[in-house]
Image (cartoon, rainbow, N blue to C red):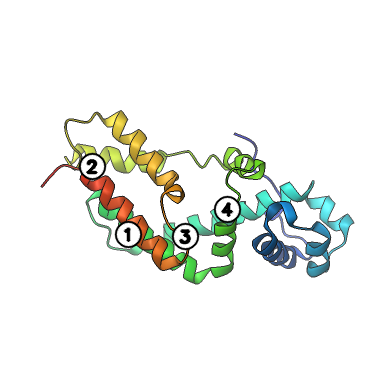
Amino acid sequence: MNTKPTGFNKEFEHNQQLFDAALDEFIHRGYDNASINTILKNAGMSKGQFYYHFKNKEGLYLACIGVLIDKKTEFMTAVMATAEIPENVFDIFRVRVAFGMQFAQQYPVINRFAESFIKEQGKPIYDTALATYNFDDNTAIDTLIQRGYQQGEFRDDLPLPFIRRVFGYLLTHAIDVTNMDTEDSFEQEMNYLITFMQHGLGRDK
């Protein structure tokens, strides 16, 4: 895994303005068509200031993704800490989907950037971001699955390693089978996916 990029991890003049301008440009023009000159003009920042903190456009884009990940992790940690969490592993993921929608409503611009990032799938910048932040790290998912398996929530004719691989893959690649036209449709189809996994992998009650 690559080293996490710097940039917005440090406070500097025009920090927030640069972040806001970068999100706006990446959301509306995509990574390939985004212009550093436009971003800097809208942020009121010189090229000298920019290149002191960022190597290039890729570095800026990856730093924006870092802020997205940090914000969502902070949000999810806070709401999960105070919420009444169900015992069933499938219901836990339904709750996480609902909280994810709350995050989208509270941070609409950051959420639109997340949606624009997903649209970069198949392009080099998408692969670079996945390698940089190791989105395929399923440690948290594995922990929940292990607990659910011990509690008898999964079919006993399927081995735990297989369940882990299938569950982890479907969740981390959910965008491939869900509709992102609206937030409501995405939430609904994520719940369809969880129901599908529950009836395919879960133990019949």
In the image, 121 versus 172, the foreground residue is 121
Q: Of callouts 4 and 2, which one flags the residue occurring earlier in the amino acid sequence? A: 4
Side of 172 relative to 10 (left or right): left
Name the disc covering residue 180, or none: 3
Question: Sequence-wise, which precedes: disc 3 or disc 1?
Answer: 1
Residue at point 74% right, 63% down? 18
Amino acid type, callout 4: Lys
Q: Amino acid at mark 1?
A: Val
Q: Is residue 137 above or below residue 101?
A: above
User: What whole-number distance in Å separates the C-alpha atoms at marks 4 and 2?
Assistant: 29 Å
Q: Earlier in the sequence, mark 4 or mark 3?
A: 4
What percent of the width, then of the height, locates residue 100?
42, 61
State the residue position of label 4: 119
Q: Which residue is mark 2?
A: 200
> Marks 2/1: CA distance?
20 Å
Left or right of 107: which side holds 161? left
Position in image of residue 74 (x %, y %): 49, 58
Which of the marked residues, 2 or 1, is nearer the chain's N terminus?
A: 1
Q: Is residue 56 left or right of residue 82?
A: right
Residue 50 seen in the current view = yes
